[in-house]
Image (cartoon, grey):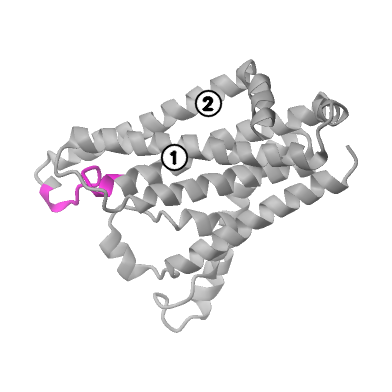
Amino acid sequence: MIKLLKIEWLKMKNYTAFVAIGLIFLVCVLGVNFIAYSLNKTVQETPVGGLMESYFSFPNVWHTVSWLSNFTLFLPGVLIILMITNEFTYKTHRQNIIDGWSRDEFIKVKIVIVFIFSAIATIWVFLVALMIGLIYGGTFSFDKIHFVGSFFIQSVSILMLALMVSVIVKRAGLAIAIFIAYVYILENLVGVIINGLQIKNATDPTKYTPFADLLPINATDNLVPFPFFRVMLNRAVPHLNIYLLLGASIVYLVGYILISRKQFLTKDL
């Protein structure tokens, strides 16, 4: 596997999109969080600021930064799509097979790259949260650090979905359109419809089982819930058990991997 990863690195290091999108992702994570930090700091300095919770001090910063950083994950997702579809466009996947790779080795190394990208993204989120927390001041704490781990699960899930779409569609433009449309439009639309029907038929609108939270993207997103005004939201909106969401997220992740492998192993090259 190390040898295969070295070959993949030779492919990536000279790929302009890899460098550009990678740097944009790192800057966006930093920028989004520092903008939100600055806004929060400004509000904290107003007369009503003392009534608000500090979202960027320890330990809340682990939760807040993990949630905000989730919005940037489409960037490495698009990068994964470009990298995979380029293999099909330029027939380099065929060349790898001719050179002695098995189909299984080819798809396995792509899956490992998804985990590596997710690990790098998670480390960066950890460092950004640590930096902002130290700048904000207060007592250092690892409490709520599990939200950074949940971000890793989010990242792996999103990137593995991108890989699956790439292997099935094989065309960059169409794969990106399907990926973005599903993550940001289609699933949200389905979720709104499901929730609307449940609220309409519920005797108490605040006490229903939000089945929409079990949809693929929602399940992972809810591992790092909306961090602001949590007390009010917990009273107003029903939530599924975190272990149920985690279990659903793992099931979907395994599904993405199995579908991607089966697609590549059984379909024509």
The answer to if 185 sits in the magenta stretch is: no
Quadrant in the picture for the N terminus: top right
Check disc 2 and report the residue beneath it: 22
Residue at position x 61%, y 21% in the image: 17
Which badge, 1 or 2, comes first in the chain's sequence?
Answer: 2
Of residues 60 and 200, the one nearer the viewer is 60
Q: Is residue 197 visible?
A: yes
Magenta region: which residues? 50-61
Instruction: Give the amino acid at mark 1.
Output: Thr
Res. 106 image quadrant: top right
Asked if residue 250 lies left or right of residue 61, the reply is right
The tag on residue 154 is none
Query: Within 10 Å of the Cα at label 2, are there few (<14), some (14-19), or many (20+) other Cα atoms?
Result: some
Asked if residue 20 lies left or right of residue 104, the reply is left
Q: Is residue 142 or residue 207 the one in the foreground?
A: 142
- The CA span between labels 1 and 2 is 13 Å
25 relative to 262, above or below: above
Helix, strand or loop for disc 1: helix
Q: Main secondary structure of the magenta part?
A: loop
Task: Give x and y (percent) for residue 129.
Answer: 31, 38
The residue wearing badge 1 is 122
In the rendered view, tell whether residue 253 sits above or below residue 8: below
